[in-house]
Image: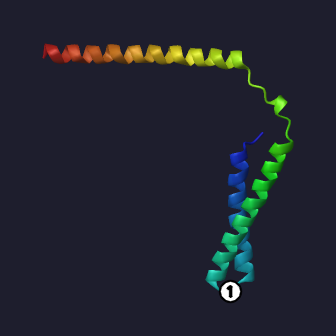
Amino acid sequence: MLKQDNYVSFAIVVGFFVGLMFGVAKFDEPELMVLWTILSTMGIYLIITVAISIYYLFMDSNNAKVHKEKLEESLEHYRKEFDRKEQEVQNIRAFIKSLRSID
């Protein structure tokens, strides 16, 4: 399932190109083409924003449960991995300092 941001981004791109296409087909003046493109982009953006808001209003939030234990286990793994990498970097820095002190 796509995220909300992806739908909004897609709507902006579609609105721009649809507006540009209709602007070129309908108007001869470049100012009106640009104005039509901007208005159609904003219109499609507003329509998709309302549609997404209505979707999330009626969506059942119980289906999107977060598994707390699995998340905490994953975070603990990443924390240990980060600590291990940090210790490795400190060892490398100490080794470089020892090389500098020898010279």
Q: Dividing the picture into quarters, in which one does residue 33 lie? A: bottom right
Left or right placement of residue 60 versus residue 29 in this view: right
Left or right placement of residue 55 versus residue 6 in this view: right
Left or right placement of residue 89 versus residue 73 in this view: left
Direction bottom: furthest residue: 28
Q: Amino acid at mark 1?
A: Asp
Direction left: furthest residue: 103
Residue drawn where x is 68% and y is 86% of the image: 28
Is 15 located above or below residue 87 in the figure?
below
Is 83 located above or below residue 53 in the figure?
above
Quarter of the image where the C terminus is located: top left
User: Circle 1 is placed at which residue position?
Assistant: 28
Is 57 located above or below residue 60 in the figure?
below
Graded by Cα atoms within 10 Å as few (under 14), some (14 to 19) or many (20 or more), the crowding at tag 1 reads few
Q: Position of residue 92 (x, y in %)?
A: 32, 16
Q: Count of labels shown?
A: 1
Residue drawn where x is 70% and y is 65% of the image: 42
Quarter of the image where the N terminus is located: top right
Q: Position of residue 45 (x, y in %)?
A: 72, 60
Q: Position of residue 21 (x, y in %)?
A: 72, 72
Left or right placement of residue 16 versus residue 48 in this view: left
Is 75 located above or below residue 39 in the figure?
above
Mark 1: which secondary structure?
loop
Q: Position of residue 18 (x, y in %)?
A: 74, 68
Residue drawn where x is 44% and y is 17% of the image: 85
